[in-house]
Each structure stands twice: as C-alpha cells, then as structure tokens.
Image: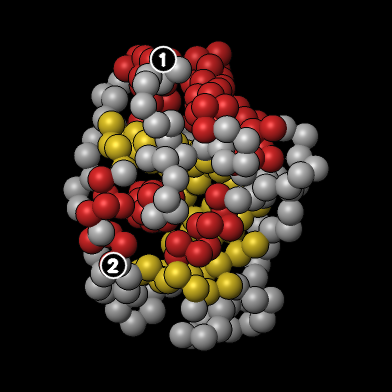
Amino acid sequence: MLLMAEALRRVLNLGNSAESESEYTAEAGSPLLLLGGPGSGKTALLFAAALEAAGEGRGPVLFLTRRPLQSLPRGRRAALDPLRLQKIRFQYPPSTHELLQLLCSAHEARGPAPSLLLLDGLEEYLVEDLGPQEAAYLAALLLDTAAHFSHRIGAGQGCGLIVALQIQEEGDSGEALQLSLVQRYFPAQCWLHVDASGPGQHCLRACLDPGGQGPRAEWWLAFRPDGEMTVTPWPAQAGKPSSDKGSSSEGQP
C-alpha cells in the first residue's frame, strides 16, 4: 500500500513538465478541484496534502476554511509533528467578501510565500447568492493568488492550489451552473465517491482526471479506525481490494 501522502504528491505534481504552456503549470502543477459529496473525505485529504507540503522543507501552507477543523486526523506521525503543524497557517474568512479581501491582500503580504494554497468548502462561499460573474471572479482570484505566490517563490518551485467543493446528487440549476463555471477554471479534477466500507474501515474511491495533462488514475482509499489513511491503486481487475489489491475500474464519472 502507498501512504496517502505519496498519492497526493502525484496529484500536486500533475503539471510538472518542461513542455507545459503555462509557467505556473510548469512550476507548481495544475490547480486541482477536489469534488465529492458530504462525508467523502475532502477535508481529510486537504489536511494530508498540507502535512505533505509542510514536510518538504519549502514555504508554509495556507489553509483557508470557513470554520476551524473539529479534529485533526489521528494515527499519522506527521500529524503529530509540531514542526509541520507550525508551518500550516489556518485562516477562517467567514464570508465571501472577507475571503475576497484576504486573497487580494495576499498580494501585498510580507514574509515567506506559501508553497501550497488550500481552500476547503468552496460551496459555502458560492451559496451566498453569487451570480456567474462573481463566482468566476472568485475562481480566477484563487488562480491569480497562487500564481502570485509562485512568482514570489521563484522558478522551479511554485505554489500548488487545491480547492474542495461539495456537490449534491440532486442540485438545482443554479448549483449546476456554478459547478460548470468553476470546472472551466480547474480542468484537473479529483472525484471522491463513498464506497462499501470494509471491516472497521471507511472506504472511498478516488477518480483523478488531470485535465488532458496525463492519463486518468483511480485509487481505493481506506480510513482505518485509528485514523490512518492509506491508498491502493485501483487496477483494471474485477474484485474488491484487499490489503494488497485494488478493485475494478468503472471509468471516470
């Protein structure tokens, strides 16, 4: 089995290619949109990404969310490392207006530029009656802020960007329009689906579409009772994954 951090390293480095058209993409990887329903592990994966980036010896991690995390993932040595936790800067903009202000002010902030920008719960900001133009501005500002951080860090490094968005099975037309609009700004997307739980485990299926910058990939994610997160590649073979094998691929949603 691979550690979740190793899988996230692949996600964070999606666009690392000398032939990429965008300087930001070439240096920092493609911005990633993390999609899933309630309880699909989006926040846990964002925190795992934050821990991974904080342990790479680069700049700090900026973690934006509307409310504080109720608990930190258990069972991971990295989660107990105070040096890593100190490098994760949590900020809690309570409204879309304050989120926009925070992102705009980041262009003038001093100190080390973040090596990773994370936003959890984008839907909580979009729900504030944002029209298409306002939603597009927010998405564009997130990309611009990450690009600004990348420019400050310098060539060969860059600032990654992962945004988590909760989706409903039966959303209204307004939510569908907002999702379609946000997806235009984030062609690389990872869909999370709650799957049948194994004994003592909470299991997910992750489907990664890198937006034309590489092959699609799928993983079987398992959250153990002690909080440890592991991931197994999902092979094109039938059958449920065991401790060594994955399950059948059914295609990207």
Q: Quadrant of residue 246?
A: bottom right
Q: How is the image coloured?
A: secondary structure
Q: Can residue 135 be seen from the camera position used here?
A: no
Q: Residue furthest right?
A: 19
**Residue drawn at (37%, 40%), measured in percent from left and top?**
60
Which amino acid type is marked by label 1?
Answer: Glu
When the figure is inspected, residue 74 is found, relative to residue 253, above or below; the finding is: below
List x then y, in percent, for residue 194: 44, 62
Quadrant for the C terminus, please.
bottom right
- Mark closest to the chain's N terminus, 1 or 2: 2
Residue underneath mark 2: 77
Q: Residues within 10 Å of mark 1 (few under 14, many from 20)?
A: few
**Residue drawn at (19%, 48%), measured in percent from left and top?**
70
Q: Quadrant of residue 185?
A: top right
Position of residue 56 in the picture relative to residue 30 (left or right): left
List x then y, in percent, for residue 250: 65, 67
Q: CA distance from mark 1 to mark 2?
A: 35 Å
Residue underneath mark 1: 108
